[in-house]
Image (tube, grey):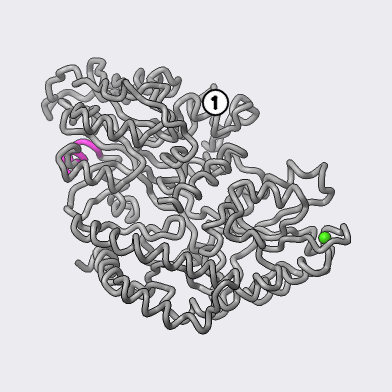
Amino acid sequence: MRKRMTRGLALMMTAAMVGSMAAGCGAKNEGGQTQTTAKAESSTTAAGAKAPEAGSAPAETEPALEGSLVSAEPKEFTIFLNFNNMPFDSNWQVWQEIAKRTNVSLKGTTSLTNSNEEEAFNLMLSSGQLADIIGYVKSSDLEQLGRDGGLIPLNDLIDQYAPNIKRVMEEDDRFRQAAYSLDGNIYYIPKNQELLSAEYWWIRQDWLDKLGLEVPTTVDELHDVLYAFRNEDPNGNGIKDEVPLFDRAGWKQPEEYLYLWDTSTTFYPRDGKMTFEPLEENFKIGVTNLIKWYEEGILDPEFFTRGASGRDTLLSGDLGGCTHDWVSTGNYNKTLADVIPGFNMVPFTPPADHNGVVKERVSRYPGVGWGISSMCEDPVTVIKFMDFFFSEEGDALVNWGIEGDTYTVNADGTKQFTEKVLNSELTPIGYLRSIGAQYRIGMCQDGEYERAVMTEVALEASKMYDSHPEWFGEDMPPYADGELELKYTEEDDTEYKNLMASIQPYVEQQFQSWILGVEDFETGYDAFVEELKARGIDRALEINQKAYDTYLGKN
Ligand code: CA
């Protein structure tokens, strides 16, 4: 989990810094990651869940309710949710409005001072007192809770009472796949998202101009441009101090830059077949090239240790030339305008790999949302309430906030945020979250909302990548932060985790020692493969193939 958390922290910082699309985009980049920085504050209140007011289950023939009401009389349910260590707060403006419109209000069971989602979750489980509604950062833990009887299957409830959720299930394969557990049950309503792209290639256009170079379109052209960045002093200080290719979060760099040769240090499916890429030919090509790039000074010498602040350091120091990162990278054009005259970071098409293929591996997937616990006495009302968020009205509330206050609707039906949001001291996303919008619930994250808070160049990046779905590959299961997120049966899950606990660290350690020149890649590769076999890579592949077949609907 180290990897996930480190990257998560980097993404958190992106969000905090510019309030751009990095924020709140699915389970892979939100939530529990702040645990890495959160103080282990002891919570004494998480067990405060209490059973709901005993509401009689409404008859199916009850008269239609007015407007968006989901209950004739006011009802209150308890909720466990602590998104990004922001415990649910019933005083949030948006949720007050939701209660007014639906007649359903929620009461958080986590103390507002709680800063450790995982701890609070475990405390709730051990207390035996489950909130009526439960959301949590890890989908596999929610599914586990479902299998253990703590969450009820929602399949029939959705079918009978949630037409909006049902529609999205039918229309959106990725949403449906995220929702279903392998036992056939739906234990939680996912948080869906419209935007596909997540990270983008960025390069210093002003450096290209200075050296009379074009934006690179292939991996070889990229090499030549970065080589020139390193050797021709584009920052003009007479010192060979440029760091042509860099990334925040050191662990991620190997993954992202091996993609240039269509390989990685982990699993990846092709044409229905699961592969472990270090065993494939492309891996040898990729590693050999990266070793060369490292020797040539093209790669950041702090390759493996550059932390989350690396982008800040290298761009504001007029040192970094090219990176692969979120839209927030475009923000430096504004913040550094006075410090580095002409500074201009622009997005560009992923460079074609050595086979001429343009591909972008990093993208977004539906993430975790919320489910209904077995202690909830009125699941019918709750599922109707959950359905509200997939209606136009509910969707607007949780994405945009309050009409007339945080956003306005234009004549053509499009929305725009008010100055209150756009010029908030908290950043737009920060402000929206402070009133309870953009929380981690079962909903659809509106792409227009994200675009509405992007800078011009960020918008350009987002549009460029989202208009090329073919770059993102077909039949791709969730591939978040360089790791496949397939669903496993309970037995397979345990065996797979055990195997990978031995395999993955070994691969990472070998990769690092090859790049840094500690060990020789060419002479060491065969022994590396032998060691992988000894550690059970074939069995891990088999399990992943089965899980992928399930994903493809073959099982
Ligand atoms: Ca220089």
Dividing the picture into quadrants, the one containing residue 132 is top left
The reply, left or right, for residue 275 in relation to residue 348 is left
Q: Choose between 300 and 457: the one closer to the eye.
A: 300
Q: Which residue is mark 1?
A: 406
Q: Quadrant of ligand 1?
A: bottom right
Query: Residue placed at 69% from the left, 56% from the top?
Result: 346
Q: Is residue 99 above or below residue 495?
A: above
Instruction: State the predominant SS element of the stretch in magenta.
Output: helix
Q: Choose between 423 and 107: the one closer to the eye.
A: 107
Residue 293 percent location from the top left of the image: 65, 72
- Can residue 161 be seen in the rendering of this structure? yes
SS at mark 1 in the image? loop
The reply, left or right, for residue 99 in relation to residue 70 is right
Q: How busy is the neighbourhood of tag 1: few (under 14 within 10 Å), some, or many (20 plus)?
A: many
Q: What range of the chain is rendered magenta? A: 154-162
Please check the rendered image and state whether residue 205 is part of the magenta-colored stretch, yes or no: no
Query: Residue placed at 22% from the left, 68% from the top?
Result: 554
Please check the rendered image and state whether residue 159 is part of the magenta-colored stretch, yes or no: yes
Work out which residue is located at the far front of the displayed protein and give it.
Answer: 518
The reply, left or right, for residue 266 in relation to residue 22 is left
Q: What type is the residue that disc 1 sits on?
A: Thr
Q: Quadrant of the C terminus?
A: bottom left
Residue 86 percent location from the top left of the image: 43, 29
